[in-house]
Amino acid sequence: MKIAYICPGTGGAFYCENCVRDHALVSGLRALEHEVSVVPMYLPVKETGGNDGSGVPVMFGAVRLYLIDKFPSLKRAPDALLGMLDNRMILDLAAGFASSTRAGGHEEMTIDMIKGEEGPFADEFDKLTDWLLKQSFDLIFLPNAFLLGIASAVKAKSSIPVACLLQDEHVWVDASDPIYRERTWKIISDKCEFADMLYTHSLWYKKKICGLADISPESVSCIPLGVDPAKYVVSSGIGQSSIGYISRLCSVMGAGVLADAYCQLLKDKTCDNAVLEFCGGYTKDDLPVIKSSRKKVAGFDGQMRIHKHFSLSHRTELLSKLSVLSVPVQESIAFGGFITEAMASGVPVVQPDDGGFTEVISETECGVLYSPNTPEALAGALEKTLYDKDKLKAMAQAGREAVLQKYNNVNMAKEALLFLNYKKLESVNGL
């Protein structure tokens, strides 16, 4: 099949777990010998396992979209002038600004994007749809519900199947002004009918999103999130005391909480030789938590390293040396791409007993769950985990085996296509 994978770019400023998932699914579909084109949205896509969208235009360029939203009269500007705003250099520069990653102030734009061809960006959706149809794609993948406007725009002109992942939309909506939340969920609910398949990566999130957006549970499939195990080297760090963190270095993902937990270990002198390894990039908004963490760790003579690069090759190199990985996310989330990356590397995880973490860690026995989600509880869990070498080895092996058997990119791609074909068969047979 000829498949279009719509992929919102972060511009490469920080580790994006959604990007890890997107890239893994793309590579899984290609491994099944499908022709997959990555179609970047908003910002350039930096890493997609072989196709960074360099031959495909950036759709809905972030700078142009923002300016048109703020100054609607720009819609009348010549296409050539507006097209200049989609220059890769301009978009790369825009990626360094944190405003594009915050919900506050972007509520109306979020709703307008979900509206698709029925909203103020109808011309943009028309251009995207025409381009997709011109390429003669057999299937279109959408990575989140905020892009369901593409599904309705496509269905207005063709019958191309559209599959949409539902993944942590609640985090963005919850961070929005309360007056917009009900409207956002309502329009997501309305637009879901245009997708041929809806799926998520955990049963926890399936239940949550179905409740928030009033979606029938029968219409949502659950597909394990996977990575390519061949790209990860099994860690040799079990005998050491290295604590890793791979995600954007920000408060929401728990960078400060992990630093506080590490300081607690140093204070109690229970892990004097441990090294704290941060990897994942950041924006200017994240500098306060980074500076604060550095200061606290220095006060206890700890060793805290921030790795400047976080591409797949740099992540796998770091993972191959870690004893444990912990990303104490402060929000309940559906899964976490960093979990499967750690599992593939044979690195046990120490995570909050919350959201999708509970589900996957309980099933695979690849790590330890702790509660409540506080620095003190995390410090206790890390201490017990790091010094039980036999348990560390068992969790490492269990995680790697789970990826080989189930949580891998090819299995993820197979299940996505299987569920999609089943949904199409239901529709044809009127089931």
Image: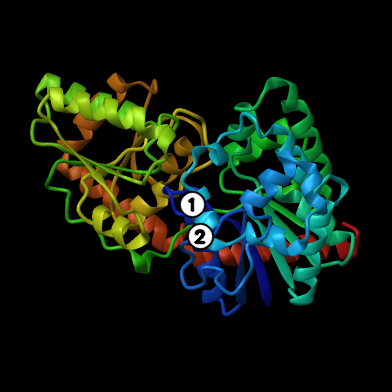
Residue located farthest toward the bottom when viewing the structure as drawn: 33
Q: Hey, which quadrant is residue 80 in on the image?
A: bottom right
Q: Position of residue 116 (x, y in %)?
A: 81, 49
Instruction: Tell me the element at label 1.
Output: helix
Q: Hey, which quadrant is residue 326 in on the image?
A: top left
Horizontally, residue 225 falls left or right of residue 147, namely left
Q: How far apart are marks 2 and 1 (CA)?
A: 6 Å
Residue situated in front as seen by the camera: 63 or 383: 63
Q: Position of residue 52 (x, y in %)?
A: 51, 68
Q: Where is residue 89 in the image (x, y as percent from the top left)?
A: 51, 60
Q: How crowded is mark 2: few (under 14 residues within 10 Å), some or many (20 or more)?
A: few
**Residue 93, numbered circle:** 1
Amino acid identity at mark 1 = Leu
Residue situated in front as seen by the camera: 297 or 229: 297
User: Mark 2 and 1 residues: CB-CB less than 8 Å, in contact?
Assistant: yes
Residue drawn at x 39%, y 41% as measured from the top left:
282
- Is residue 225 visible in the rendered image? The answer is no
Q: Identify the coloring.
A: rainbow
Residue 228 lies, with reference to residue 273, above or below; the image says below
Residue drawn at x 62%, y 27% as measured from the top left:
174
Q: In which quarter of the image is the C terminus?
A: bottom right
Residue 396 lies, with reference to residue 251, above or below; the image says below
Q: Label 2 belongs to which residue?
A: 89
